[in-house]
Image: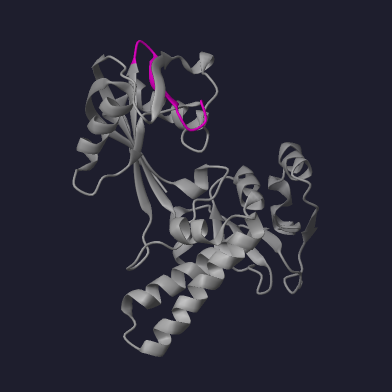
Amino acid sequence: MYKKIYIDKNMKQLISEDFKRILIDSSIPFDFTDELNIVDRNTLYLTNDKNRLSKNLINVFLLTNDYDFLDVKNAIFIKNIEDIANVIKNDVWKQWAQELQFLAQCSLAYSKDKFDRERSERIREIACEMLSFKYDLPLEKIKMDFAGEIGYQTPKVETRAAVIKDDKILLVKEQFDGKWALPGGYQDVNVSIRENVIKESSEEAGAVVNPIKVVAVLDYNRHHHVNFPYGMVKIFVLCEYITHSFNENTETLGADFFSLDELPELSITRTTKKQLEMCFECYKNPQNWDTIFD
């Protein structure tokens, strides 16, 4: 976790008492500053001005226009000021390991030089050792989960089915944690997005559905409280309900419909309430819905 946050003094009017409470609840000290030459380790600097980026601190840039990210380099981007809470919770140690792993894997994918490849293998191993030491997990498990792929590193793709009828949404009870989420999972390599949504709905909920609208394409790490090491793209698809009959399977314990005001405990690494609200908004007016994407 980051140890402190400096906030650009020019943003003072945007900092509400609720936002200050987020920082206080996260036990993160903060100061307003107009000084750009502060040197401090493991510290964030929040600004919304492209001309006031820090050269020494870790910049967090509040996007006013989506295209601003093209001009701003070496920054963590957020769209809502409250999203700083997710940034704060991310571990800088883990981010360093992720970047080392990414650079090493890219080098292994393209380098033909024997010595470059040997150095890249060692860098990748160091990244795994960092996470193993930090989180007290077996090195071999880290290597398998975190550094088990070859080729240029790209995000995982996950699809989630938003099946709504009578103002209730279909959720499945996960075997993993006993909590509830939208039916879905990783995209299979040999099927389309549409086919994957149909397959996952059938396997996890016993549901027959007709996908009709892409609700959103989201960056997992911007919308969940944990950070997925490879990166993940989540695709939400609004589906027409036809029928369902739940069958026991290895992934889910049950399936049922819930209204927004009577939700069960959600498996928030898979589905958040905000994402369900987004799906309901699309359901109310699918013809005029513009797909949301990060």
Q: Tell me which residue sits at (56%, 46%) in the image.
A: 226
In percent of width and height, residue 30 lies at: 79, 54
Q: Is residue 7 left or right of residue 212?
A: right
Is residue 212 in sight in this rendering?
yes
Q: Is residue 232 left or right of residue 287?
A: right
Quadrant of the image occupied by residue 244: top left
Up the image or down, 263 lies above or below 224; here it is above
How is this picture coloured? one colour
Up the image or down, 23 lies above or below 176; here it is below
Find out whether residue 252 is within the magenta segment: no
- Which residue is at the front of the view, 58 or 270? 270
Q: Tell me which residue sits at (47%, 83%) in the image.
A: 119
Up the image or down, 171 lies above or below 50; here it is above
Which residues, given as a range, are shown in magenta? Answer: 165-178
Q: Is residue 120 left or right of residue 53?
A: left
Q: Tell me which residue sits at (44%, 65%) in the image.
A: 70
